[in-house]
Amino acid sequence: MQGASHPVRLTRGLCVLLFFCVLAASAQDASWETRIEDDGLLVETSDVEGSQVKAFRAQIVVPATPEDVAVRLRDIDSYPDWFPDTVEARSVGRENGAWVNYVRTSAPWPVKDRDAIYVSRLERLPDRLRISVEADPDLLPEKPDAVRVVEASGGWELEAAGGGTRVTWRFHLEPGGNVPAGLANARVLSTPREALLALRHYFRTRPAAATDH
């Protein structure tokens, strides 16, 4: 992999798979609280043991196929145009069936920007597509003007529904450093809301003849 200090660890894929298995096994036990339910968008949050930052589960239906949505989500170069607070996003490379991206997000002064290296994998299941995402903070050297995210995991599930795709996004991130819990949890709501509405808007306004393939 170009630009990486060492190969992507094979065990990280197993960790993300375990994350989804735990989510599935505990879905009925998790105490999800509905925080936003408006205009076809649902955002729920849940406490995470040992963390002041909540996990979120967000869902929306977009007018596109699961494959087209997956293409958009994997287009890392487009993220500064639509993904909330993203000021830099670029591909680092690929290894062992995964793709690796560097993402930097802005933060209000005096909080430093956060940056992260995300390892993602696409899995094609019989009835849906799944994109798992996990942070691997050691793949690139840290930058002095940003705080590296060391813990993040979750992913996207894309399932055909109602002539489009039901997008379900689950995620939990520890921002590190001295970020007030109130600020972090505000973004737990604003980020999925803005991202999923922007994703739907993209497919609603995309010319019919356009294709991402």
Image (tube, rainbow, N blue to C red):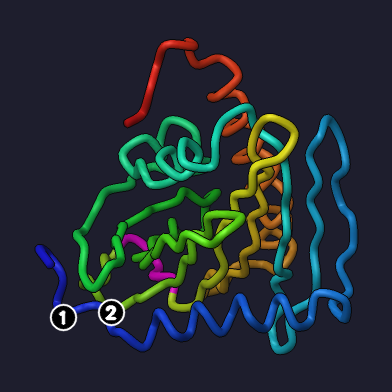
Pointer 2 local density, CA inside 10 Å: few below 14, some 14–19, many at least 20: some
From the image, give the main secondary structure of the stretch colored magenta. Answer: strand
Check disc 1 and give the amino acid type.
His
Q: Are marks 1 and 2 in contact (CB under 8 Å)?
A: yes
Spatial distance from mark 1 to mark 2, Cα to Cα?
Answer: 8 Å
The one of 193 and 123 positioned closer to us in this rendering: 123
Q: Determine the residue located farthest toward the left in the rendered image.
A: 2
Location of the C terminus by quadrant is top left
Give the magenta part as a residue range: 145-149
Res 84 visible:
no
Residue drawn at x 40%, y 68% is: 147
| In the image, residue 147 lies in the stretch drawn in magenta | yes
Label 1: state its secondary structure: loop
Q: Would you name the residue on which mark 2 appears?
A: 138
| x 86%, y 35%: residue | 38
In the displayed structure, 193 sits above or below 162; it is below
According to the image, label 1 marks what residue?
6
Image coordinates for residue 208, horizontal then vertical, percent? 49, 11
What number is the disc on residue 178? none
Magenta stretch contains residue 191: no
- Left or right, 141 with reference to 162: left
Q: Position of residue 69 (x, y in %)?
A: 50, 39
User: Between tags 1 and 2, which lies in front?
Assistant: 1
- The mark that comes first in sequence, 1 or 2, is 1
